[in-house]
Amino acid sequence: MLENHSTQAAPASSLNVLQQWQRVSPIALVYFCLHLLKGIFSNVSILAPLLLLFYKGIQRSPGYFMLALGVLIIVIATIGMMQYLAFRFRVSEDTVEIQSGLLRKKQLNLPFNRIQNVRLLQPLYYRFSNHLCVVLDTAGSNQQEARLAALPNNLAEALQQAIYIQHVAVSHSEANDDLTSQTTELVSDEALLCTRSISDLILYGISNNRAILVMGFAAPFYVPITNILDQQLQRFGIDASQWFNYEQQSWFWFVLAVIATTLVFLLIITLFSIAASVLTYYHFRLLRTHDRYIRRSGLLTRHEISMKRSRLQWMHLQQDGLDKAFGRCHIHYEQIVSPLAAVQGEGQHGKIMVPALTPAMAQQLLQDVYPSNQLAVVQFNPINWRYILPGLVLICLPLLVASQVFFWPTAPSLAYLSIGVVMVIAALQILRWRRFGYAMDAEYFYLRRGLIGIDYFCVPLHKLQQLKVSQHSFMQRAGLRHLHLVCAAGNLTVPYMPAQAAYDIANYALYQVQASHRSWM
Amino acid sequence: MTTETFQNLPVSLAQLPSLDTLQWQTLAPSYTPLNVWLNVAITSSVALLWLALLWQPFWPLSTTLAPVVFWSGIVLCVLCAWSCLYCYFAYPLKAYALRQHDLSFQRGLFFKTSITQPITRIQHIELKRGPLERRFGLATLQVFSAGGAAHTFALPGLPVADAETIRHFILQHKDTVQYA
């Protein structure tokens, strides 16, 4: 036991500084103020009318506007200052205690073993003074997090290590394991699994861009945007509207102008996407310690996400349409999703995603996590062709009949066009059916699905939480079942599979869960 | 040396306990009638409200509103009547099965679903009794796993004594005791 104390003492001794109630480093003032600003501007939809009012106001009396701006800055700085002063914390006896709040005083007691994850963030302005923001995630029935806005690098890391060592101590106390070796290992053994270069990130930015989505969302603004552009261009003596007037231009030039404009828009959005990708994933490093996966990345704000290996629920390989052209894919390490976190947009914190991997590297990472997995060689079984029937009968057929009845009398060309559209929908349905594939070996369940892109899932059977078999009357007659596997990371469905195969998988999965006694977390 | 004692026999899928041969147990006999009568009561009160709205003399409906009220009322009443019928035919098909290591529940008339919850993955368990359930001696057993709120396993319409027994069985199960 003495030895245990000595190894634990190393990080703990530096933590002695934190035993008294204290404030975080003064640089946190910047953090608090920026956080407030971010909070205000993330509600832009509410603020929009106010901003419009401001805009009108600037034009009329710039002086008052500057005054208002000054007041706003002072108010934010004051609130930030007060929040900073009100925030006090201490670390004592394996517990983080936090007092905070201006009007409503809050006191939070976080025992180390209640803390699931310690995330270290480094915004750009902390880099010169070597500070870190420590985020303590406490998963559970209600997702809570506590932030220590600014700690010196060494203290933050010592705190993180102290918390993780406590975890190891707890998980091994029953087994009476060799704690000493475990803890020393924890400090030293970070193995680098994977890095990503800038070119990889650019590829990810291109393939992962949501250009079409953005263009769709922007649709209501097309008219005002084009009007503004037109006015601006007219000032330079360019008559842009003339290019798009197909009464004045030949069809060829008209089509060329449309294509060129679309490409320019696509290019701009893609550039944004690349920038976002580089910002988030710059200097990407995936590390493995003896019980955790750690991801570090970020150009301006450096993020660290860590996930306990036992918490990993399944591996998800994703290959979108463009990824296939580049021969790349992304790997997701997925753990338990708290529904609340997903709603708050915090769901990503729990996941580790490795972007733009070559298939060989993806395979290597997968092997590292699940050494006995056979995803690369496994033979996927197809699902029954009846999968396409509901789509054809309930969507395509009514659409076809309705469009023909509606368009034939008035606009035959539209009727032909709608036949084409319905055929595309049907083809997509068939493609989706062909993509579905399932397989199982002694330890894992594999699922392939997708439409244009493909997703692969590799699920250890013992992680199963619940199992559902369903069918409707027609499926019963054809001997088919839907199989739903519910895990802590989500729900996987294999539709229209042969009943015998569904029960084989279900029975074997249950056997794995019940006989192996392996924990899911 | 140790390799001789180590065994890795193939697991025969055919010999595993199978889900399609579960011994299903029906729910409490009063469960279906209770729900049918509940649905009938709702249907008739909806119909009464609708008729009252159509015939009341205080607030004459405008000519544009009258057909809307008339037809939406008919649609609503038909839906309610349908739910009564569905309840009458589908609820007796609800059944549960308890094995050593898992709990199953099946339901559905056209769309049949059977859910199986391994006991070792149960996080916590709740016994719920509404006012009507208390009056008729019924209880609903809710079982929570890490699969999330959308996948809460619920066993409705159990006689209280049975619900208590199942609850006790789950709580005493060595997997729950050991891993929860």
Image (tube, helix red, strand yellow):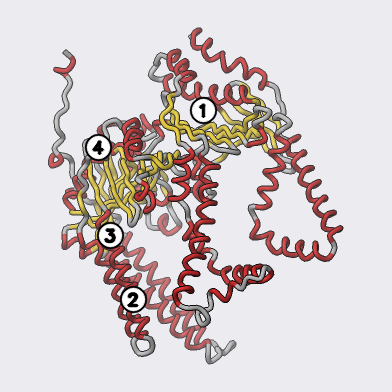
- Could you tell which of marks 4 and 2 lies nearer the N-terminus? 4
Kindly indicate whether the residues beneath marks 4 and 2 are on one polypeptide chain: yes
Residue at mark 4: A374
Label 1 or label 2, whichever comes before in sequence order: 1
Q: Residues within 10 Å of mark 3 (few under 14, many from 20)?
A: some
Indicate the amino acid at tag 1: Asn
Mark closer to the chain start, 3 or 4: 4
CA separation in Å, label 1 and label 2: 57 Å
- Which label is found at residue A431? 3
Q: Does dot 3 land on a helix, a strand or a loop?
A: helix
x 49%, y 44%: residue: A348
How crowded pointer 4 is (Cα within 10 Å; few <14, some 14-19, many 20+) is rated as many
Q: Disc 4 sits on a residue from what chain?
A: A
Where residue A17 appears, x then y in whole percent? 67, 19
Return the x and y of residue A160 as percentages of the image width and height. Answer: 55, 26
Residue with the mark numbered 2:
A399
Real-space Cα distance between discs 1 and 4?
36 Å
User: What is the spatial separation of the Cα atoms under label 1 and label 3, in whole angstroms?
Assistant: 48 Å
- Amino acid bearing label 3: Leu
Q: Are marks 1 and 3 in contact (CB under 8 Å)?
A: no
The amino acid pointed to by label 2 is Leu
How many angstroms separate mark 2 from mark 3 (CA)? 19 Å
Q: Chain of mark 1?
A: A
Q: Residue furthest right?
A: A63
User: Residues at marks 3 and 4, common chain?
Assistant: yes
